Amino acid sequence: MRYLYSFSLVSQITKIRARLSLAASLLVLSTFSIADDRPNILLLMAEDLSPRIGAYGDKTAISPNIDQLAEQGVRYTNAFTAAGVCAPSRAAIISGMYQESIGAQHMRSRQFADAKYAAVPPAEMKAFPELLRAEGYYTFNRNKLDYQFSAHNPGTGPFTIWDDDKRGAIDFHELPSDKPFFGYITFLGTHESGILPRDVFPRSRAHLIGQLSQFWLHWGTEDQIGADDVEVPPYYPDTPIVRKDIARHYNNLITIDRQVGEVLSRLAEAGLAENTIVIWTTDHGDGLPRAKRELFDSGIQVPLIIRWPEKFRPAYVKPSSVDRRLVSLVDLAPTILSLAEAPLPEFLHGQSFAGEEAQQERQYVFAARDRIGEFPDSQRAVRDHRFKYIRSDNLQAGGFHLAYRDNLDIMQELWRLLERGELNDVQKQWFSKRPREMLFDTLADPHEVNNLVHDPEFVDELERLRNALADHSSSIGDLGSEDESVMAERFWPGGVEPITKPPTLRRNEGFVTISTSTEGASLGYQQNGGAWRLYVDQIPVTAGDQIQAKAVRYGWSESEIVEMTVD
């Protein structure tokens, strides 16, 4: 039996009582024992990596463990992220809502030069792991958050989302045996920082930090791919430096693949593989120039693999199969909730593409780009199986000086060749003032270098995609037109982080209830010094019990802790 998370105490109790008797619900709440056979779900996410995977037909990639996972599962070959950069993309993933609809569209809201702030999503939005936790799942996270209403480090996000949130490896033997788990593990080795030159004096503090972290991440991994082994896309000049950095990206994948294999081995050794659905993907496309941060497919197309154990595999799913449906990673939240047999809240923008709640096939995927570093920007994209339309409200060049990216050797090479006039017309496109509209035939032009917006043959496609994008922006409440300073003031008035109001504890006939006057706040509690739990309904207590509680509204500081000793 499971209980249902809702967004007000009244509706929550109503829904709980509709699903199970009050006596049964109190038993579940008092023991946290889940008497069902729902699957464990493990989400494995690499960083900054396009489908450069052997299972996706890449002849250069060395990825045997990921390839084996694909052999055992389903490869989704048309999967795309909602942004080409980590924090906005991860905000969409964790929320199931497009980042531009919840104020999470600008890269690293806390680094906004004019006014530090965090995204404050709508009151009804809850991160999908919190919804799973409310349904009786044990949730854990490893290595990274980066939702825009948290910092990027573990332990900085709303405490109600995870039972366990930190860096390092997970010991599957230590997970509770009386409830299913949802785990989210980030693999850092293919991050853009992994392409930073490691054999030169650091060019900046960020370069030094990247060097040290990548030395540690890749310690013991031998390079197996040389510069002559890689293919160079037409938007790059074919030079030794360009080839070296592309090869470095492939060699970084070797570490990620090994780590994925290690996690899957530990899962099997713990006897959990046959009860666990495994999802492997990446947070956006390649960590290379003209890929990361961009809305080209090089920035938003990602690999996506799902492996079902036999007991949970739907009848229509065949191992080693390919699914060519359009998928957006904003769909991960409803899909994972569906796989866990959990209700799908109305605020979700994504749609389930697997499990019993799978919805009709997508016609389009959408993506957005907004402020990057210190540069205001606004681009929106829509794509179907063949055509991609990008609308740009800022007509600056895509290739501009960005301090972090300029540390890359490949970026230094591009700047040198541009200054010397040694880039051809295709290679100069990214450094040129961008047109307001771009239309690409991704089948005929997979690198998106031939803009068809003025070609009369494609006028119908252009109009269709324009309308699809306009309808989408209107339906989700796109905040892209709101000045970021205005939004920052709305979220954090005066540049000061709001503090969630303390909750109220009340005792009533052997139970304690917790409430808050802060709209949309989540509640957590400790009982007799135990672990922090997500509050969903009244807590059975006996005389002498000590209850501590606190509240948090996403994007705000936690409340102070309120205590009660039951008399």
Image (spheres, rainbow, N blue to C red):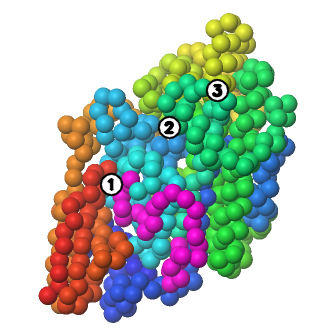
Q: Residue 554, which numbered label?
A: 1
Please identify the quarter of the rendering in which residue 264 is found.
Answer: bottom right
Q: Residue furthest left?
A: 567
Instruction: For mark 1, give the secondary structure.
Output: loop
x 67%, y 46%: residue: 218
Q: Which residue is mark 3?
A: 200
Q: Main secondary structure of the magenta part?
A: loop
Alpha-carbon distance for marks 1 and 3? Answer: 41 Å
Nearest to the observer: residue 79 or residue 112: 112
Camera-near label (2 vs 3) is 3
Please identify the quarter of the rendering in which residue 450 is found.
Answer: top right
Camera-near label (1 vs 3) is 3
Question: What stretch of residues is rendered in magenta?
Answer: 156-181
In the rendered structure, which amino acid carries the disc numbered 1?
Tyr
Instruction: For mark 3, give the secondary structure.
Output: loop
Q: Which residue is mark 2?
A: 368
Alpha-carbon distance for marks 2 and 1? Answer: 22 Å
Q: Give the x, y percent position of residue 518.
A: 21, 59
Camera-near label (2 vs 1) is 1
Q: Give the x, y percent position of residue 25.
A: 36, 87
